[in-house]
Amino acid sequence: MDSIIIFCANYLFVVVIIFLGLAWLPKDLKTKKYFFASTVLAGIIAFILSRIAGQLYYDPRPFVVDHIKPLIPHAADNGFPSDHALLTMTLTASTYFYNKKAAALMLLLTILVGVARVLARVHSPLDIIGGWFFGVVGAIAGYYLTIFIAKKYFKNN
């Protein structure tokens, strides 16, 4: 069971990235541009928000608090918010605007990544929820900012 948790905690995010690519590929050129731009903007916004939150709130990692060995090696730094949860949810929520079926599958994987990070004892549930929250906020902001910019500056695209 530990090997499954370790795999999901460390590597399952790559499958989320692959699903994003598979959702992006069949789109027409205009949609690909919007999808790409909104995902990049979402990532930037989510990353900035998460860094600000990490400076404002410190949540020690569970293995530090409980004086136990985590399933995966990790620095004993601030766990809030989880970068893995942030990445997977940002990509999932960004995909939602362009391919709801792919986003549904990605959401299942995103939840598995988050649960695995908690089971591996490198994050608390709050760290995961924080990453998910900032990922969703970033994706929503990235999507609407892309539409706003496209309408204002690129009327024919």
Image: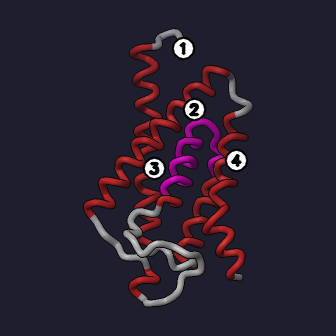
Query: In which quadrant of the rendered image does the N terminus lie?
Result: bottom right
The residue at which mark 2 appears reads as: 35
SS class, disc 1? loop
Q: CA distance from mark 4 to mark 1?
A: 27 Å
Q: Is residue 5 above or below residue 27?
A: below
Q: CA distance from mark 1 to mark 2?
A: 13 Å
SS class, disc 2? helix
Mark earlier in primary sequence (4, 1): 4
Give the residue at the far left of this rendering: 56
User: What amino acid type is highlighted by mark number 2?
Assistant: Phe
The answer to whether residue 106 is magenta is no
SS class, disc 4? helix
Q: Is residue 118 above or below residue 104?
A: below
Mark earlier in primary sequence (3, 1): 3
User: What amino acid type is highlighted by mark number 4?
Assistant: Ile
Mark earlier in primary sequence (1, 2): 2
State the image quarter where residue 51 is shown: bottom left
User: What amino acid type is highlighted by mark number 3?
Assistant: Val
Q: Position of residue 49 (x, y in %)?
A: 35, 50
The answer to whether residue 59 is left or right of residue 88 is left
Residue 101 visible in rendering:
no
Q: Is residue 43 above or below residue 37?
A: below
Highlighted range, magenta: 86-104
SS class, disc 3? helix
Classify 10 Å Cα crowding around label 1: few (below 14), some (14-19), many (20 and above): few
Q: Residue at x 59, y 80 (%)?
A: 71
The residue at which mark 3 appears reads as: 136
Numbered mark located on residue 122 in the image:
none
Q: Position of residue 148 (x, y in %)?
A: 40, 24
State the image quarter where residue 62 is shown: bottom left
The residue at which mark 1 appears reads as: 157
